[in-house]
Image (spheres, rainbow, N blue to C red):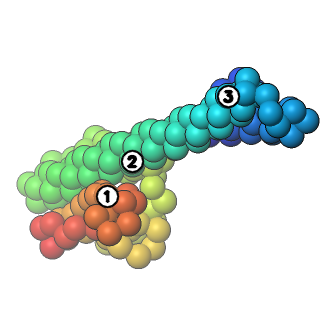
C-alpha cells in the first residue's frame, strides 16, 4: 500500500513533487505568465492531494493490521480454551480408566495450530497434561487447568494496537 503511494508513477508523491518542481522552473523562467502561476498552484494542489492519499493509505494499512492482530488474538484464545477443555476431558477420562489418546491427539493438534500463530513453549506434566507458555514466560494454558487469554486493544494514549494477557481461571 505504501509503495504505491510513495513510489514513482502517476498519482505518487514523487510524481507530484516532480511536476511541482517542473512548474516552478517554468514559472521562474517566465514569472509574469499567469497561466504558469495557475499551473504552479495546480501542481501544489496535486502534491497536497498525493500526501493526503498516502496518509489515508497508511491509516487504512494500520487499520487492516489492527484487524488482523485482533483476529489472531481471537484464534489464540479459541485454541487455548480448546486445549484447556481437552485437558480437563483427558483427566476425567483417565480417572475413570478410559483411554484418552484421541483426546491427546486433538489437544496436540490444537497446540500445533497455536504454535503457528504465536511462539510457544510446551512443558509436559507428569500426568500427561501440558503447560503452554507464550515463548517461555506467560502461561497460556495451565496444566492444572485454566488459561491466560490474550486481549488486543488500541491504546487511547498512542493510537497503537497493544496485545496483553488477561488471566482467566487461574
Instruction: Of the two numbered discs 1 and 3 on the same chain, state the one appearing first in sequence.
Output: 3
Residue 11 position within the rendered picture, expressed as x and y whole percent measured from the top left: 66, 27
In which quadrant is the C terminus drawn? Answer: bottom left
What residue sits right under mark 2 in the picture?
A: 66
Query: How many neighbours does mark 3 have within 10 angstroms: few (below 14), some (14-19), or many (20 or more)?
Result: few
Q: Is residue 126 above or below residue 1?
A: below
Q: Is residue 4 visible?
A: no
Could you say where residue 53 lies in the image, as x and y percent from the top left?
A: 54, 35
Q: Which residue is mark 1?
A: 154
Q: Are marks 1 and 3 in contact (CB under 8 Å)?
A: no
The answer to whether mark 2 and mark 1 are in CB contact below 8 A is: yes
Cα–Cα gap, marks 3 and 2:
42 Å
- Tell me how far mark 1 sits from mark 3, CA to CA: 44 Å
Which quarter shows the N terminus?
top right
**Residue 12 or residue 155, whichever sits in front:** 12
Judge by depth and name the residue closer to the eye, 121 or 106.
Answer: 121
Label 1 element class: strand
Image position of 134 with respect to 8: above or below: below
Work out how far the residue at label 2 is from the one at label 1, CA to CA, in angstroms. Answer: 8 Å
**Going by the image, does 96 lie left or right of 76?**
left
Residue 47 seen in the figure? yes
- Please name the residue shown 28% across and 47% down the image: 74
Q: Nearer the viewer, mark 3 or mark 2?
A: 3
Where does the image place residue 84, in percent across and percent down from the top left?
A: 21, 56
Image disc number at residue 38: 3
Amino acid at each position: 500500500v505504501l509503495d504505491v503511494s510513495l513510489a514513482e508513477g502517476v498519482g505518487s508523491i514523487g510524481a507530484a513533487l516532480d511536476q511541482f518542481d517542473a512548474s516552478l522552473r517554468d514559472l521562474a523562467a517566465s514569472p509574469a505568465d499567469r497561466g504558469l502561476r495557475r499551473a504552479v498552484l495546480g501542481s501544489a494542489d496535486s502534491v497536497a492531494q498525493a500526501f493526503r492519499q498516502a496518509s489515508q493509505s497508511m491509516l487504512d494499512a494500520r487499520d487492516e493490521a489492527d484487524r488482523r492482530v485482533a483476529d489472531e488474538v481471537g484464534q489464540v484464545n479459541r485454541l487455548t480454551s480448546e486445549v484447556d477443555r481437552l485437558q480437563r476431558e483427558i483427566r476425567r477420562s483417565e480417572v475413570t480408566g478410559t483411554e484418552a489418546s484421541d483426546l491427546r491427539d486433538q489437544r496436540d493438534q490444537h497446540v500445533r495450530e497455536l504454535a503457528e500463530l504465536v511462539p510457544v513453549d510446551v512443558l509436559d506434566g507428569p500426568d500427561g497434561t501440558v503447560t503452554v507458555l507464550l515463548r517461555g514466560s506467560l502461561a497460556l494454558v495451565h496444566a492444572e487447568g485454566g488459561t491466560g487469554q490474550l486481549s488486543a486493544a488500541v491504546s487511547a494514549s498512542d493510537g497503537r494496537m497493544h496485545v496483553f494477557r488477561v488471566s482467566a481461571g487461574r
